Amino acid sequence: MKNNRLVIAAFTLILSANIIVLVKVSYNRSQISQQITLTEREVYQRYRRVEENSATSLQIQWQTPPDEDYGYYSHNRYLRLSDTTLSKLGLKKSCNDDNRHHKIQREAWILLQQNGLAYQTHLQQILAKIELQRQTINAQETRDKKSLKTLNDKAYKAKNKRSRLYAIAVAGNKESLSAAYPEQENTLIVKGLISKTNHCNNKIRINELYLNPLHISQEVLKESVKKNGNQVLPHHYDLNIAVGALNEAWVQSIQTRNQNE
Amino acid sequence: MKNRDSAQLRVDQINAFEQELKQLRSEQVVTLSEDQQQLITSYHQKIRSQLSTQFDVDFNAGGKSLTMGMQVASFIGALALAVSVFFLFFQYWGFFTTPVQVAVLITAPLLTLAATYWIQAHEESGYFAKLAGLISFACVVLNIFMLGQIFNITPSDNALLLWSVYGCLLAYAFNIRLLLVASILCLYGFIAARIGAYNGMYWLSMGERPENFILPALLIFVIPSIFKHIKQPDFSIIYRVFGQCGLLLAILVLSFWGRASYLDWNSDVIEGFYQITGFVFSACFIGIGLKNHWKSVLYTGNTFLVIFMYSKFFDWWWDWLPKYLFFFLVGLSAVLVLLIFKRLRLLQNQAEESLTS
């Protein structure tokens, strides 16, 4: 008798848990609170062996605006915050060597900006740096010809290949970010994980965005290219991401784009 | 008889009685008439037959070895089948639409739970029911994990609580010790995650503060003292051992890694504090094990006491003592530990004798 009751309880538990999850998903997707369009520059398909995992998921490439400490090639993850923001996040500028408190990750809200001022500024910095290096090169020297080609490649990549998605602000709640950056196009506020650096400054490190990885459903992938049993995305595409009432994201659609657009 | 263990104990008792009676008769200490012998033999046969039908007990050492082999095979088979469920789903889920994926994920644990119930009702030994129960647990883990992947849901520690409760229900319904272990580990994770989150850290970073595991360890240790497990005495042992191990492992880690503590003291002071705490708790567990006749608690306490002791020796002497002297001292301490354990065994035997008399 007791056995039967336990089995019934187990059945009920499975059903209840699944119902709760599906109801929450439906509620989340019933209202779209944010939307953003990313391209193949900001998103790439995660590698997986098709024989072991037949689903497709995407990884979003992003960085923070460069600090003077770092070169322009690194995928920067550091952001400098004000003293007020730092204390609101429960972090403090600590100057001792014992980094135990700094390594602890905390949740925070992060503002992402697609092809905005942060990207444009960074691009100009990169191109200016490349131009400065170009001026020191003697175009006649063979070794310098190679260097010139490398610089040209870098400039091309910066203009056409690099991700244009930048994390530009962090806060303890979504409302303060929305208030600080009102009505901005192509922005997304998502949750992520941050930690304080162990240096004596106001820098934090954005370790992870909750956006990653993004699963794409079979229905959305209908128009993708099938090649050798390996479903791949088109070479150039627009990925429309929506965020719902419960701040969970999903891929709404993938639209192929001509190279020239 | 309440369970298989007590039934097996009864059969062993009968076998031991027959062996001892044979010895006594051969030494002409006692003589039984034919009628008495016949009466005892038929009574024992009746008990054996009943227990064999009801509990599938072993009658000899050969049977026990085979049972052990079956348990090992059942354990390996269950783990392998559970893992294969995961890989099976990963291999094909990308070809299904979302409704089909969700339907498969929800029906798999329900069907395997029903199968476990049916198998247990029709199979005496219980091994196949345990296999099916483990697969059902794997299906529930897969269910929640994959729904999170499909709908890009932010990971939450509530999944650990769900898995813990489900594992616990199955463990008690079908007497599956491995599922109780899984349930306890999930419960550890959930409580530690909540304590970590309460202290401002991300829940998945719970391992960065071993102190998060101290409270759940103590709670798990006292569960069998609050809820008596008469029908499943093994479960009490599992709770106590895992409670002890969780507590002492956390203290052991902190005794080497003071930086991971919540305490805002110097790292060396924290390490020293936890080293002393480790010794104290190990000794307490030895005392508790002796007082309550809990062998598992006693042995686990002994083991950790030895670990703490040797780790201290290493800390103190490894760098500056000549190696031969270091190992000589370790050997001497082993002799001392032997003498202590001998004394503890004597005390335990005396305690058991006074209990039976």
Image (cartoon, helix red, strand yellow):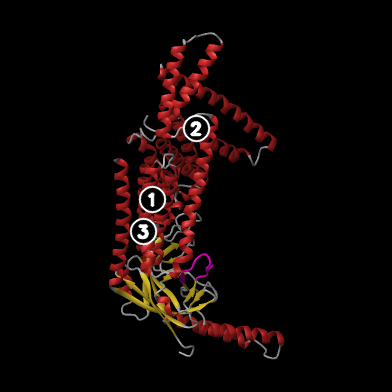
Task: Give the residue at mark 2.
Answer: B299
Quadrant location, the C terminus of chain B: top left
In the foreground, A200 or B57: B57
**Which badge, 3 or 2, is on the more N-terminal residue?**
3
Q: Is residue B158 visible?
A: yes
Q: Main secondary structure of the magenta part?
A: loop
Q: CA distance from mark 3 to mark 1?
A: 12 Å
Q: Is residue A59 above or below residue A11?
A: below
> Residue A84: which disc?
none
Q: Find disc 3 in the rendering and name its residue.
A: B107
- Give how far across and how far down residue B160 sits, in percent: 38, 53
Q: Position of residue B157 (x, y in %)?
A: 37, 55
Front tag of 3 and 2: 3
Q: Select label 2 or label 1 by which is in front.
A: 1
Residue that mark 1 sits on: B115
Say which residue appears at 50% left-offset and 78% top-offset: A226
Q: Are marks 3 and 2 on the same chain?
A: yes
| Residue toward you, A238 or B232 | B232
- Which marked residue is nearer to the observer: mark 3 or mark 1? 1
Span highlighted in magenta in the image: A46-58
- Pointer 2 local density, CA inside 10 Å: few below 14, some 14–19, many at least 20: some
